Image (tube, rainbow, N blue to C red):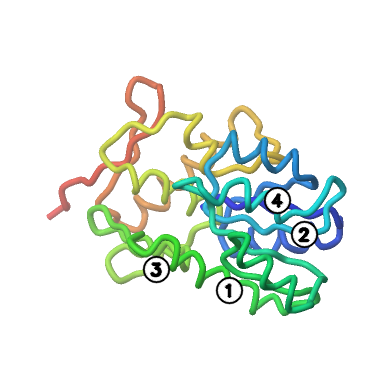
Amino acid sequence: MRALIVEDEPDLMGFLSSLLTNAGLIVDRTTTIDAALAAFGDEAFYLAIVDRRLPDGDGLSIVKALSAEEKRPAFLILTARDAKSYVIEGLNGGADDYLVKPFEPDELLARLRVILRRRHPRRSLVIAAGNLSLDLEGRSACVGSEPLDLRRREALILEALVQRAGRVVTRDVLIEAVYGFDDLIESNTLEAQISRLRRKLRDAGAQVEITSPRGIGYMLKATEPVL
């Protein structure tokens, strides 16, 4: 899942980015209302954390601008304004939740899980192909009943491929699913990560394979078990 943080305090931005990245999210960052609206026009986000006090205005205007969109993200307002009137204004303005600074990291993550479940109730938390299963919430994979040790980006690649099992996923789509705006991607980075992922799946006895049809992308498909 891709998340956008709209925050102009560098230290808090860095902390939030690390917190969400470690939770398995792809994180993009902006510091202004205008940049945030431009980002929403370019990408599909499941989640946005928005500060109210931004250099070019009230961050709540972002929520209001997108509140009528059918596929808008889940919004968590994060702010130092703790008066009850601000909380009510934020919720009435379309925010899914409102958290006052300073906050506990565990509380922030718990609130995010709740609003994501509420906004995407039919999103399956476990997807599978062959004897491979992937827990989307815990970012963990198993082959049969045995856990598969994956790096974060390997898990994101696997999620993108399993969700589109049997279909070709172009390199550009995979890059969008795995990397944020600010990530530096060398020409062979994705290929190296897929190579490691293939090896781990093979060594674990997964009944799936990742192929590269016609060199235009990658496809994950189930294979017959070896008797």
Answer with the quarter of the image where residue 100 lies.
bottom right
- For the residue labelled by badge 3, is the local secondary structure a helix, a strand or a loop? strand
Alpha carbon distance from label 4 to label 1: 21 Å
Q: Given contact means CB atoms under 8 Å apart, are the residues at marks 2 and 3 in contact?
A: no
* Amino acid type, callout 3: Pro
- Which marked residue is nearer to the observer: mark 1 or mark 2? 2
Q: Where is residue 87 in the image (x, y as percent from the top left)?
A: 70, 73
Q: How far apart are marks 3 and 1 (CA)?
A: 27 Å
Report the disc number at residue 147.
3
Q: Which amino acid does label 2 sit on?
A: Arg
- How far across and how far down the image is residue 3, in percent? 60, 52
Element type where label 4 sits in the image: helix
Find residue 111 and name its label. Answer: 1
- In this image, 211 relative to 17: left or right? left
Q: Name the residue under label 4.
A: 61
Label located before the other in sequence (3 or 1):
1
Q: Which mark is residue 52?
A: 2
Distance from disc 1 to disc 2, alpha carbons, whole Å, reads 18 Å
Q: Left or right: where does residue 63 sit relative to residue 201? A: right
